[in-house]
């Protein structure tokens, strides 16, 4: 929510609280000066006098926020204490730890995660469904995702699990959200009908258009995969009713023309298109460094400007990154973790082991028991304590900490935090875009 605040609401209080932690982030748009109050992720419009004080010494930040009525008297909304446990609400099944592509940067080492290529055991998949429903109560929802490798290598298991989970959900009045992330090369029209029937969110990995994609995502024999993917995805794009087919672009220094990619993929009929920088590859290939991240930010802003322009005209322009960011800002999203990995979400390996998420499959640093015994509570407590954003440096003092959550655990644990300027730059732009969208299309946020 965007709330108007001015100096007339200021009220003097006791001595300044000495803390170097950033408690606010001041930003400007053509609509005035604004501030994000970090605690609670609240956005206010402020006048120049307040802005000047808030821009001053961060040690006085909490005191100044309180003076201007911008800080609740309540204790901070996120404490240092990590939650003790979470109920399992989302599982992704690595139904096939193998793949028919040879992407240059693959985090899963051609789908096998460094182990023997294999399909998931049926017993493991069925036990995973039992775990997913174990603590869910009527009226709640759970999420079931299929990933790999390339999940469609093991289509039969996907179908069996989906039908079974849908039946379990119906019997127990629990909503099941299904999703699949696929390279698109094996899709058949009958898959589209199946996904449509169960209302799947289908994410197709596409790294650009034509040769740009082919360079990063070739078939095992070295041939390009773009034409084949589009050929196979087209019928699904035409079929979308309950199903939503989106494109996900992994950005490397080799495919930085994001605006062109976004426009072309949207014109094909994808429901939305999202971009994600390649920050860690086991081979190091395609990793983004400072200069490329700077260029990516410029391109993301260009895409964002087009979204604002089209929204003002009443048109839909599904640039997923900005749509998600502004919705989260509007809801006041503030979280001590970047995602649900190792909390309410786990990635299930082909042999039934539970890992923090789909990217940690086969990684002993992020293992949490298995689908039969359930979540290893000790391992989870340790993970939640260690991964809490207040326990991360330099995150604990960063103004973006509760919107960012400290960065993807997998990337941070394998490469560190090379993208903080990019993340803060993008969040700063998203905050400005939020204020501007409120002005041009107030209905956008319901
Ligand atoms: S990862 Fe970087 S941008 Fe995110 S909270 Fe940590 S320091 Fe801030
Ligand atoms: S750890 Fe990273 S890859 Fe895994 S769910 Fe979180 S953000 Fe996604």
Image (cartoon, rainbow, N blue to C red):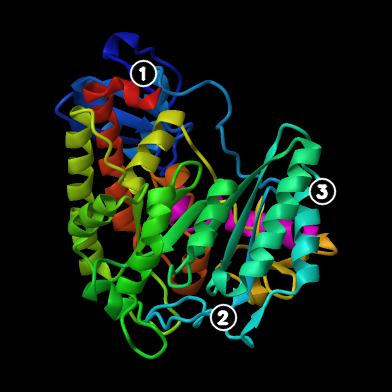
Whichever of callouts 2 and 3 sits on the residue coming sooner in the sequence is 2
* Element carrying mark 2: loop
Q: Which mark is residue 68?
A: 1
Asked which quadrant contains residue 173, the reply is top right
Q: Which residues are magenta?
A: 376-397
CA–CA distance in space, label 2 to label 1: 57 Å
Give the vertical position of 115 relative to 247 (above or below): below
Residue at point 81%, 55% (across, down): 130
Where in the figure is residue 446, as x and y percent of width and height? 40, 22
Q: Which mark is residue 31?
A: none
Residue at point 19%, 23% (across, down): 48
Name the foreground residue: 134 vs 434. Answer: 134
Mark 2 closeness class: few <14, some 14–19, many ≥20 residues within 10 Å: many
Asked if residue 396 lies left or right of residue 114, the reply is left
Please identify the residue farthest to the left as the structure is shown. 30
Q: How many marks?
A: 3
Mark 1 closeness class: few <14, some 14–19, many ≥20 residues within 10 Å: many
Q: Nearer the viewer, mark 2 or mark 1?
A: 2
Magenta stretch: includes residue 50: no
Where in the figure is residue 280, as x and y percent of width and height? 42, 73
Name the foreground residue: 260 vs 230. Answer: 230
Residue pointed to by mark 2: 98
Quadrant in which the N terminus appears? top left
Where in the figure is residue 43, as x and y percent of width and height? 36, 27
Examine the rendering and report whether any part of residue 382 can be seen: no
Q: Main secondary structure of the magenta part?
A: helix
Asked which quadrant contains residue 13, the reply is top left
Where in the figure is residue 341, as x and y percent of width and height? 60, 57
Residue pointed to by mark 3: 134
Please identify the residue farthest to the right as the structure is shown. 373
């Amino acid at each position: 929510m965007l709330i108007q605040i001015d100096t007339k609401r200021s009220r003097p209080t006791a001595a300044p609280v000495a803390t170097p932690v950033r408690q606010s982030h001041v930003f400007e748009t053509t609509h005035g000066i604004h501030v994000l109050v970090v605690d609670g992720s609240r956005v206010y419009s402020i006048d120049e006098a307040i802005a000047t004080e808030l821009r001053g010494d961060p040690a006085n930040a909490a005191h100044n926020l309180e003076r201007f009525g911008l800080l609740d008297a309540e204790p901070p909304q996120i404490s240092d204490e990590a939650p003790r446990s979470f109920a399992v609400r989302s599982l992704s099944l690595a139904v096939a730890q193998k793949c028919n592509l040879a992407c240059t940067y693959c985090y899963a080492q051609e789908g096998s995660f460094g182990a023997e290529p294999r399909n998931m055991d049926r017993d493991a998949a069925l036990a995973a469904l039992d775990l997913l429903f174990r603590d869910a109560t009527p009226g709640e929802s759970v999420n079931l995702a299929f990933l790999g490798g390339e999940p469609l290598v093991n289509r039969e298991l996907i179908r069996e699990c989906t039908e079974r989970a849908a039946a379990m959900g119906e019997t127990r009045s629990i909503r099941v959200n299904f999703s699949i992330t696929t390279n698109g090369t094996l899709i058949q029209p009958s898959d589209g009908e199946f996904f449509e029937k169960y209302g799947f969110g289908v994410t197709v990995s596409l790294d650009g258009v034509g040769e740009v994609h082919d360079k990063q995502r070739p078939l095992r024999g070295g041939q390009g995969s773009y034409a084949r993917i589009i050929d196979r995805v087209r019928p699904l794009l035409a079929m979308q009713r309950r199903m939503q087919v989106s494109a996900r672009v992994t950005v490397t220094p080799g495919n930085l023309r994001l605006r062109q990619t976004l426009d072309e993929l949207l014109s094909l009929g994808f429901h939305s298109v999202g971009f994600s920088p390649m920050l860690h590859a086991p081979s190091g290939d395609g990793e983004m460094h400072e200069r490329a991240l700077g260029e990516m930010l410029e391109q993301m802003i260009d895409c964002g400007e087009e979204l604002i322009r089209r929204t003002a005209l009443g048109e839909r322009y599904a640039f997923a990154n900005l749509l998600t960011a502004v919705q989260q800002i509007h809801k006041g999203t503030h979280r001590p973790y970047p995602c649900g990995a190792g909390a309410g979400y786990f990635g299930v390996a082909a042999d039934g082991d539970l890992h923090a998420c789909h990217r940690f499959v086969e990684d002993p640093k992020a293992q949490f028991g298995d689908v039969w015994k359930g979540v290893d509570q000790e391992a989870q407590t340790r993970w939640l304590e260690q991964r809490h954003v207040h326990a991360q440096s330099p995150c604990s003092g960063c103004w973006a900490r509760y919107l960012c959550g400290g960065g993807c655990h997998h990337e941070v644990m394998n490469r560190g935090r090379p993208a903080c300027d990019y993340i803060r730059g993008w969040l700063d732009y998203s905050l400005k875009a939020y204020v501007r969208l409120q002005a041009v299309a107030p209905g956008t946020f319901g």
